[in-house]
Image: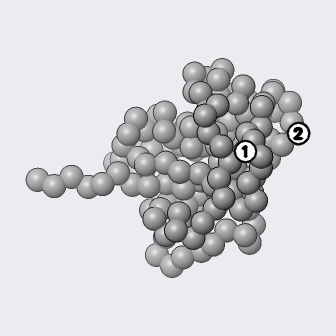
């Protein structure tokens, strides 16, 4: 009996400092190795959004070692599912890939309370995604 490799999910937003980092952290945490997770940005920031780091810490997920990464065509090609979060036309599209666009507020410049709301919206979607990918 051969086992299928874990599906790979790539989360993409412009700066890879907020939404995509929260999504990657939540998916990695909840999927517990059943899904491979990556994130990237079309114009990566210098560092993660501090309010995002704090909001994730509150739910027991440490993303302090993560760094914003540049989106590459190789990363998109390697992914089974590409989830964009407001990167507009800058995200490369390849035929045959599963794409989703999650419309979520950008946490840049927002306070912790607003970032918590975005985190919770992402967590709900991530849980649904895990159910779909591991069914």
Q: Nearer the viewer, residue 133 or 59?
A: 59
- Mark 1: give few (<14), some (14-19) or many (20+) Cα within 10 Å: many
Write down the residue under mark 2. Answer: 109
Q: Which mark is residue 101?
A: none
Q: Residue at x 61, y 23 (%)?
A: 59
Q: Nearer the viewer, residue 43 or 32?
A: 43
Comes first in the chain, label 1 or label 2: 1
Q: Position of residue 78 (x, y in %)?
A: 45, 65
Write down the residue under mark 1. Answer: 17
Q: Give above or below for 108 relative to 15.
A: above
Task: Give the side of residue 115 with respect to residue 60, left or right.
Answer: right
Q: Residue at x 47, y 62 (%)?
A: 79
Q: How many angstroms separate mark 1 from mark 2 (CA)?
A: 12 Å
Q: Give above or below for 1 relative to 21.
A: below
Q: Residue at x 59, y 27 (%)?
A: 62
Q: Give above or below for 119 relative to 92.
A: above
Among all residues in the image, which is located at the extreme bottom? Answer: 95
- Mark 2: give few (<14), some (14-19) or many (20+) Cα within 10 Å: few
Q: Position of residue 99 (x, y in %)?
A: 56, 65
Task: Give the side of residue 23 with respect to residue 32, left or right.
Answer: right
Residue 47 quadrant: top right
Task: Give the side of residue 38 with respect to residue 118, left or right.
Answer: left
Q: What SS does tag 2 mark?
A: loop
Q: Give above or below for 85 relative to 123.
A: below
**Camera-side mark, 1 or 2:** 1
Q: What SS does tag 1 mark?
A: loop
Residue 102 can be seen in this image: no
């Amino acid at each position: 009996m051969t086992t299928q490799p874990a599906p790979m999910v790539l989360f993409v937003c412009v700066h890879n400092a907020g939404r995509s980092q929260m999504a990657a952290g939540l998916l990695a945490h909840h999927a517990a190795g059943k899904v491979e997770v990556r994130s990237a940005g079309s114009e990566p920031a210098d560092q993660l959004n501090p309010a995002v780091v704090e909001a994730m810490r509150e739910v027991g997920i440490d993303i302090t070692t993560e760094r914003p990464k540049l989106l590459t065509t190789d990363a998109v090609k390697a992914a089974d599912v590409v989830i964009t979060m407001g990167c507009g036309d800058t995200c490369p599209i390849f035929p045959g890939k599963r794409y989703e666009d999650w419309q979520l507020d950008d946490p840049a410049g927002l306070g912790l309370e607003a970032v918590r709301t975005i985190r919770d919206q992402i967590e709900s979607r991530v849980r649904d995604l895990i159910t779909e990918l591991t069914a």
